[in-house]
Image (cartoon, grey):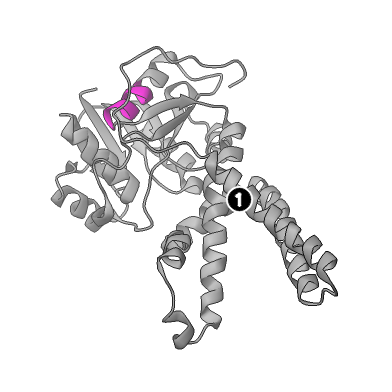
Amino acid sequence: MRSAAVVGTGLIGTSIALALRGRGVTIHLIDADPETARAAADLGAGVTGTPREPVDLAVIAVPPRHVAAALRQHQRDGLAHDFTDVASIKELPQREAAQAGCDLTRYVGGHPMGGREQSGPLASRGDLFHGRPWVLTPSAHTWTRTVERARELAELCGARPVVMAHAEHDRAVALTSHVPHLVSSLLAGRLLHGDPSQLALAGQGLQDITRLAAGNADLWTDILSSNAVAVADILVGFSEDLDRVADALRRLSAADGPEQRRAHTDRLTTALVRGVQGRARIPLRTTAPAPSRAPVAVPRGV
């Protein structure tokens, strides 16, 4: 890859641009807000404006509901030979791209699994995706060349390419990203009911669990609404867990005798043990660079 265009110079787009610039790729920065693009350029992420000739790859780094429109516009204008996006939802952009008449042969969905609670180009980092999975979701129409180009993008950014089906990806991120963000926000919202003397006792644990709540509310409204069914399904189960714990606590306070207390404390212990077991299933994060290049295997039905 010798050249690329990044459409949308927020945190993710600018971080990708910085990573590619560090690997010697010529980068063109495009944003609806020229000031934002200039801020990214001032960081050394590339040059602002559209290229004179089509670049190798265009990275559409805009919110999920704007991906299809941006893809259609830049395909029509001949911005690049191949196109990918980095939205955290994959079914919706793919469906809307098909409805908009985009060239699906030269487009593959993508999602780098890295980010920060801050937003904007000033929060960007060239190593943001080192050692992280980078999901690719080719459709039945996608050319192999386009998939390989998107894989090269991920590897140049230090990430590990992973091929998934669109729906499979959306269910996975609902569990591992979208619901955790929403739960963090809901818990942080309860702090509005605390008085200053209570909040003065807050420790690192509360900082850790509410860190995600600092994310951009408008962007996360777009993300959550774009993956509404998958998120809602997980929240139903989570709500049931909360109800069981709340019921155990209420009954514990009114328990009459050690046997009743033991029954309710056992329910609490079970919930806590399940938390320990679930957390142990999270793979350890590594900052190692992506492995050496190997062919991408596209599963049937993707």
Residue at image location 52% in from the left, 47% down from the top: 177
Front position in the image: 292 or 258: 258
In this view, which residue lies farthest toward the front?
258
Estimate how packed mark 1 is, as few (under 14), some (14 to 19) or many (20 or more) residues with alpha carbons within 10 Å.
few
The residue shown at (39%, 43%) is 114
Res 80 visible:
no
Q: Secondary structure at mark 1?
A: helix
Residue at screen point 47% across, 21% down = 105
Residue indicated by mark 1 = 275
**x%, y% of residue 288?**
30, 31
Q: Quadrant of the C terminus?
A: top right
Between residues 260 and 96, which one lies in front from this camera angle? 260
Q: Is residue 222 left or right of residue 8?
A: right
On screen, residue 278 versus residue 42, left or right, reads right
Rendering coords of residue 207 (x, y %): 42, 66
The magenta-colored residue range is: 149-157
Prevailing secondary structure class for the magenta stretch in the rendered image: helix
Residue 155 on the magenta segment? yes
Q: Tell me which amino acid carries mark 1.
A: Gly
Q: Nearer the viewer, residue 211 or 6?
A: 211
Q: Is residue 214 above or below residue 282?
A: below
Question: Quarter-wise, where is residue 253 in the image?
Answer: bottom right
244 or 263: nearer the viewer? 263
Q: Position of residue 245 (x, y in %)?
A: 72, 63
